[in-house]
Each structure stands twice: as structure tokens, then as C-alpha cells.
């Protein structure tokens, strides 16, 4: 679908041709294998130079929302470091190629952010490759459903909280040592922070924690000229959903409960991140932009 086709269309009908259906993939999953394919803005996102010369690190930038943000940032003029897990290399290389086709630098760094030492290494490599860092997008997340709350194990909690929360703290601590005034930090939270589903209690809890982290850190860093904000997506068609993020049977009609009556596409999340990264949002601090198709939240 081209940009021109999207300009004045009915948002409830947009992406009507992309209807999620029951399917499964082994963790961590690939965008390549989603059926139908998601839209990350490959053809539909048009940049306007709002991030010219910026240097960004995006965790989980190989697929889903992170991939859409990486494409958008590149088309807005930023150089981008993408972090991903080694089994996701094929997706990461595809997104890296799209970034480079815009004349921007794409640095691909594989590794697991659940490990403290790797977080230090990731930030150091990103800064070395880009010559600095002024945008950090804490986007990578882990979600696994449990129909019975008592089935959640200590290992499950560790994977969810270390991926979604611990890594966010660690990466931010490391990045702040190298970020100056005008830098921005953007965290990916979720509608689950406000409307938790009973089968992903640990995930929802971690996302509520991200909201508190975002607001608290924003108040501390504002005086240094560094802004911290968050984006809370609703149901979005990504590999997160098909790698035990949801029961397969729930993927038929995924997103139908929104006001628009459909799931979101990763490209529809990207403009919120671009806005929060750009100087246009210079008076936005400690806020969460809800991009959820009309699901009512506080």
C-alpha cells in the first residue's frame, strides 16, 4: 500500500487486507514468517527530515514495532543501531538494508539484553559506531501467556522482567553517561499496563512498571535537558503474538475489540516515536502516548 493510498482513507478499513489468523512460531519468531505479513512502513512511511543527524539505539529493532521505528528514524535522517537476538538475524539484516537504502548508517548488534554485561557492551558499541548517542528506544519485550496464574515459574518471571524492566534500567543507566541535553529516551509500554489480560499477568505488571519508571525518570532528567516519554501500543500484529504471546486460537480476530475493529500495524506506531524523538515534542516530558485503536485507558 502506497503513501498516497493511505492519505485520506477510512482508518477502520486501512489494512483490511491484513487479517491475523491462528498460527505459531518458535521463540523468538520472525517477521519473515508472519502470515499475513505486517506493514513496517517499507512502502508507506515517508520521512520529512525531522531527525537529521541524530544517533539512535533501538532494542528489538529487527521486527515488529522496533523495525517500523528503525525505518521511520532512518527516513527522518537518523543513523540507527539495532539490537536483536541471534535467531532474528535475517529480519535484522533486512531492516538494516532498508536503513542503508536511505543513505543512513545501520549497525546490527546481536545479543541478549537480559544480561547486565551485554547491556554495557551494547551501549559502548553503539556509541563507538555512531560517534555518539542521543536517542535511546527501549523497545524489546517478552510476552508469554499462562492460562493459569499458578503456572508462572521463577524462570518465566526472570525472562519477562529482565527483558522488559531490568534491561531498560541498565541500558538507560549506561546511555545517560554519554547523552547530553536534547537527547531523548522512549520506552515501549502497552495497553496492558491499563487493561491487563488475565493470561499475561507478569507481562502486564512489567508494563505498568515501565509507566512508573518513565514518569519518575523524566522528572529527574528534565533539568538536564533530557526528555523521557513512552508509547503504549494496543494490539499490534508482530511476532510477539505468535511466539506464545497469545493462544493461537485468540489470533483469529486479534484486535477486533478496538474501536477501529482491527489490529494495528507496526508502521502505525512509528509516528509516535518520531514525534517524541524530535524537537517538535520539546515540551512533552514524562508522558505516554496511547496508540491503541481506541481502547479506553486512563
Image (cartoon, rainbow, N blue to C red):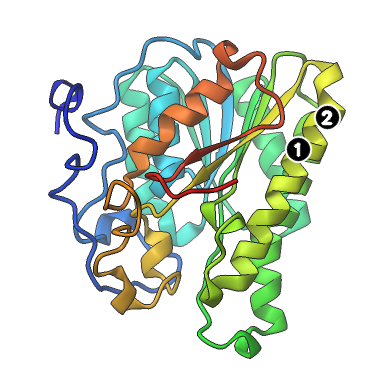
Please tell me which residue lies in front, 284 or 44: 284
State the image coordinates of residue 231 (x, y, percent, origin top left). 55, 39
State the image coordinates of residue 216 (x, y, percent, origin top left). 82, 39
Residue at horizontal 70%, vertical 37%?
Answer: 123
Q: How many marks?
A: 2
Residue at horizontal 42%, vertical 27%?
Answer: 271
* Rendered image quadrant of residue 226: top right
For residue 138, which numbered disc appears in the image? Answer: none
Q: Which residue is mark 1?
A: 215
Q: Quadrant of the C terminus?
A: top right
Q: Residues within 10 Å of mark 1 (few under 14, many from 20)?
A: some
> Which element is circle 1 on?
helix
Please tell me which residue lies in front, 234 or 185: 234
State the image coordinates of residue 189 (x, y, percent, origin top left). 59, 48
State the image coordinates of residue 100 (x, y, percent, origin top left). 36, 25
Q: Quadrant of the N terminus?
A: top left
Q: Which residue is mark 2?
A: 219
Asked if the residue under mark 1 is in contact with the one under mark 2, i.e. CB atoms within 8 Å, the reply is yes
Q: CA distance from mark 2 to mark 1?
A: 6 Å
180 up-or-down from 172: above or below: above
Q: Is residue 275 visible?
A: yes
141 up-or-down from 199: above or below: above
Left or right: 42, with 96 as reference point? left
Please tell me which residue lies in front, 286 or 115: 286
190 up-or-down from 283: above or below: below
Q: Residues within 10 Å of mark 2 (few under 14, many from 20)?
A: some
> Which element is circle 2 on?
helix
Q: Is residue 62 visible?
A: no
Left or right: 241, with 181 as reference point? left
Residue at horizontal 20%, vertical 61%?
Answer: 35
Please tell me which residue lies in front, 81 or 248: 248
Amino acid at each position: 500500500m502506497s503513501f498516497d493510498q493511505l492519505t485520506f482513507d477510512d482508518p477502520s478499513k486501512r489494512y483490511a487486507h491484513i487479517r491475523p489468523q491462528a498460527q505459531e512460531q518458535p521463540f523468538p519468531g520472525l517477521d519473515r514468517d508472519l502470515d499475513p505479513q505486517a506493514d513496517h512502513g517499507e512502502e508507506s512511511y515517508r520521512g520529512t527530515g525531522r531527525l537529521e543527524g541524530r544517533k539512535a539505539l533501538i532494542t528489538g529493532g529487527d521486527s515488529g514495532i522496533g523495525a517500523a521505528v528503525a525505518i521511520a528514524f532512518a527516513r527522518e535522517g537518523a543513523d540507527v543501531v539495532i539490537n536483536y537476538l541471534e535467531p532474528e538475524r535475517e529480519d535484522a539484516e533486512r531492516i538494516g538494508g532498508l536503513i542503508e537504502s536511505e543513505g543512513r548508517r545501520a549497525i546490527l548488534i546481536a545479543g541478549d539484553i537480559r544480561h547486565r554485561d551485554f547491556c554495557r557492551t551494547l551501549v559502548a558499541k553503539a556509541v563507538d559506531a555512531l560517534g555518539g548517542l542521543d536517542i535511546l528506544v527501549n523497545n524489546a519485550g517478552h510476552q508469554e501467556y499462562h492460562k493459569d496464574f499458578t503456572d508462572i515459574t521463577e524462570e518465566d518471571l526472570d525472562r519477562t522482567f529482565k527483558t522488559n524492566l531490568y534491561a531498560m534500567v541498565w541500558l538507560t543507566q549506561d546511555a545517560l553517561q554519554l547523552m547530553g541535553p536534547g537527547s531523548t529516551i522512549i520506552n515501549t509500554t502497552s495497553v496492558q499496563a491499563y487493561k491487563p489480560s488475565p493470561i499475561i499477568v507478569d507481562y502486564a505488571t512489567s508494563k505498568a512498571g515501565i509507566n512508573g519508571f518513565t514518569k519518575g525518570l523524566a522528572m529527574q532528567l528534565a533539568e538536564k535537558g533530557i526528555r523521557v516519554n513512552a508509547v503504549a501500543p494496543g494490539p499490534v500484529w508482530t511476532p510477539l503474538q505468535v511466539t506464545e504471546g497469545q493462544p493461537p486460537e485468540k489470533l483469529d480476530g486479534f484486535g477486533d475489540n478496538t474501536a477501529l475493529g482491527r489490529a494495528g500495524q507496526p508502521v502505525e506506531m512509528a509516528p509516535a516515536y518520531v514525534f517524541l524523538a524530535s524537537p517538535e515534542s520539546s515540551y512533552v516530558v514524562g508522558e505516554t502516548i496511547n496508540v491503541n485503536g481506541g481502547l479506553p485507558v486512563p
